[in-house]
Amino acid sequence: MKLFGSALRSSLYQLGMMAIAIGGLPMAALAHGAHIQARTATAMEIQANYDSGEPMAEATVQVFAPDDPQTPVYTGLTDADGKFVFVPTAPGDWEVSVRQAGHGDIAVVPVESEGAIASTFTNDAGLTLLQRGMVAGAVTWGCVGTALYFGQRGKNRAHS
Amino acid sequence: MHIPDGILPAPVCVAGYAIAGGITWVALKRIHKTSDSQVEVPKAALMAAAFFVGSSISLPVPPVSVHLVLNGLLGIVLGWYAWPAILIGLLLQAILLGHGGVTTLGVDAVMMGIPAVLAGQLFQLRHYLGKSLPAKISLGLFSFIAGAFGVGLSAMIFFALVIFAIPSTLDQSTEQTFLKALMVGHIPLIFLEGVFAVLLCFFLLRVKPELLER
């Protein structure tokens, strides 16, 4: 009897809590109507490519608002062309990270009021094939020069 | 397989630098112990150039593309010298090509340098384990194993690091699908680098066999 009493009391208590919970809910959540409103906003489009030039399709995108660099505001995947669109809601430095299987990049895009990208921002285009070839050539030439220098020194020492 | 800036958490990058610093110390000490530490420098410089350029040569393995690493080869030809050569090659790649990053230089060096040095030791094992085989077969076998081992171990370290570093905020399944594709893409690369090492060793055996003896 005592057991039944305590069970009854606890279920009554639960009922009471539920009533408070329902009473506390905002009215809108109980309504069944829905409205869609539309407004124009300035969005930012990200284009992510591998340095071979091919787009990073279906790469994970994380967008961090200026005031919180820890939790992403938007997360999603790039489309087949490596593109992703989001709306920066506040001015400041927005951080966009795109990554796929251990590869990726982080870009910081300064946003002015109204969601426009600051005019000081320039896109990092990466190296063209020609620049890449020139860098590789210069480094190779430097290494060959080092090799020749030390090779010659070794020979001179052997002679003396 | 260079890990760029911003993928790994900061403690991992710091740990990478710490380990790389320790190994640099050991490697330089080992190099200093040799009778003339400058004799190998020309060879190391040329191999560093090959390593630097190798990362720009990408091989498409649909749906991904992989690039040559050549660290096993460096280990075979250079031994302990492979470590400074890779370190310099990685620094230049990070600064000039944007391959990898400056914060992850330590991690990348550990990822490619340790397998290179180990591959070099593995290649030297042919003097003990390959004795019973004909000289040419032993050379071919051990150069293939060492060349494949270098890039294989690097790939394993890379995937371990990347899987460990996937933040919980990411969509795990898409990330894993691409990781798997990239893993499969490395299998032909491992074979290719093994074959590459065999070809280079046979070439050196013909033109300058003393280069293979350290």
Image (cartoon, coloured by chain):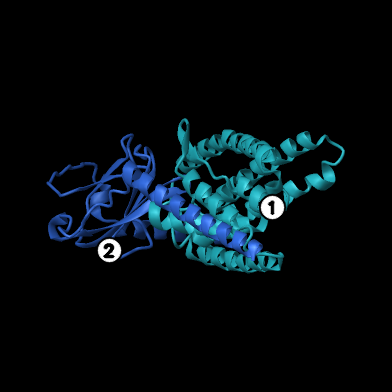
Front residue of B36/A8: it is: B36
Report in which chain the residue with disc 2 lies.
A
Q: List the single residue furthest toward the top.
A: B62
The picture's colour for chain A is blue
Q: List the single residue furthest toward the right.
A: B132
Numbered circles on residues, count: 2
Chain rendered cyan: B
Picture residue at 64% right of the left edge, 59% below the top: B39
Res B110 → quadrant = bottom right
Front residue of B24/B163: it is: B24
Quote the CA–CA distance across marks 1 and 2: 45 Å
Report in which chain the residue with disc 1 lies.
B
Front residue of B200/A26: it is: B200
Residue with the mark numbered 1:
B118
Q: Secondary structure at mark 2?
A: loop
Residue with the mark numbered 2:
A66
Work out whether B28 lies above or below B164: below
Work out whether B32 lies above or below B57: below
Instruction: Indicate the amino acid at tag 1.
Output: Leu
Does residue A9 show up?
no
Q: Position of residue A28 (x, y in %)?
A: 23, 51
From the image, state whether disc 1 or disc 2 is nearer to you: 1
Picture residue at 22% right of the left edge, 55% below the top: A122
Picture residue at 47% right of the left edge, 30% below the top: B62
Q: Secondary structure at mark 1?
A: helix
Instruction: Indicate the amino acid at tag 2.
Output: Pro
Does residue A24 show up?
yes
Q: Position of residue B121 (x, y in %)?
A: 73, 52
